[in-house]
Structures are given as structure tokens and as C-alpha cells.
Image (cartoon, helix red, strand yellow):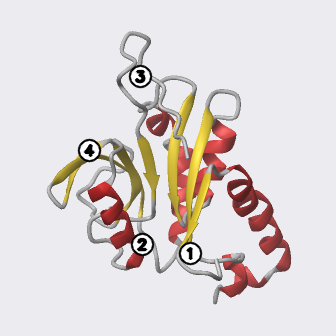
Amino acid sequence: MHIQTESRDNKDNSQKQPIMLFHASDYRDYPTGGTTGTIKRFLKYSRFDCLLVGSTNDYTVKVGKWQKVDIEGKFYDFLPIARSWKEIIPSKITLFIGSLLFYKRILEKFRGKSMNIMIFVDRQCYTALRYITARDKKINAIYKMTDAKNPLEDSSRTIAKFKILQEIYFRYFFKPLLTDSRLIFSIDDKC
């Protein structure tokens, strides 16, 4: 797979576009679980410059402002775009809303005609970026698939049982990412 690596400016073609990672976490310890571990390993061994976009449950952290974070001895630019309201609002929704609210902050890190993004589970962020940047930038997406079907079908939330919402979710959040991704990798044969 070839990742588009346009220069940040016209003078220096050696500078490459980074990969921006999206996940509903702070990439350090919230939330704990397999995906966060996968991301940490990716960051440890990646040869690409990486930018991190996510959420936080630390109320001393300013949402919507780029900051440096230390992840296992390496420093990365991190943009928290949402706070965790896990018991009230699902993290996928808060991250989607944060993508819409802080899209200018997200895009300010990119120069040129393309942006490379990696989506870990949180497909909604791709939909926001796809429509925000539709006329502006080509998005090279990489998606980590952790389930093979519409997550609303398995959700225990009452609102997720409505077939119309399941269809909207599939059509506007899941299908565009599956269709447009340059690369999809899964965690098991079922995916």
C-alpha cells in the first residue's frame, strides 16, 4: 500500500504528511483494553509521524487544543476533541460531535491536497472529515475493523433497536469508510 506523502510546503519535499489517528481515548490509559494496546504498539513501531485525536476524562486537560503527550517515552501531538460521558452519551457520539466542532483544529495540521488518517473503531470521525473536506482534500483512510456487522444491531441501548437508525448508521457512517478506505485490517477471520 502506498500512503500519499505530499510535502508540507512547496520548498521542502522531504517532509511527509503524518498519519492522524482517531480513537475515543487519550492513547495512554483511558480506556483500558485491547484497542489502546494495539495503538500503543502501532505507535512504538511506526515509521510515520503520527498525530493523535481522541477524548479524555481528565478535567484538567483543555479540549480543542493541541498538546504534547508522552506515550511510552515518545512525544506526540494530541488533540482531545471530547470529554468522556460514557455513562450518559456513548463515546462514539461525543467523538463525532467533537470532530465537527474542532474540524479546523484537526485540519490545521495538514498542508497540501491529501491527509492520511487511521480510524480505530470510531467510524463516525471519518464521515465528519469526509464531508468537511469533500472539496478540499483527498483522504487516505486506514480502518481497523473489530466487528463485522453494524454495531447498533448488537447494542444493548433501547434506541439502537430502531431499524431506521441502524440503516442510517450503516449508510452514513459505516459504508462510506468501507468503500473509501485504502486499507482495512481486521482482528479475526469473521471480520
- Dot 3 or dot 2: first in sequence order is 3
Closer to the observer: label 2 or label 4?
Answer: 2
Dot label at residue 67:
4
Q: Report which quarter residue 82 is drawn in.
A: bottom left
- Dot 4 or dot 3: first in sequence order is 3
Q: What residue appears at the point 56 percent right and 75 percent down from the top-left corner?
A: 146
- Dot 1 or dot 3: first in sequence order is 3
Amino acid under disc 1: Thr
Dot label at residue 35:
2
Image position, residue 118 (x, y; %): 50, 53
Dot label at residue 8:
3
Amino acid under disc 4: Gln
Furthest residue toward front: 1
Give SS at disc 2.
helix
Q: State the CA–CA distance, disc 4 to disc 1.
A: 29 Å
Q: Report which quarter residue 33 is drawn in.
A: bottom left
Q: Is residue 151 left or right of residue 53?
A: right
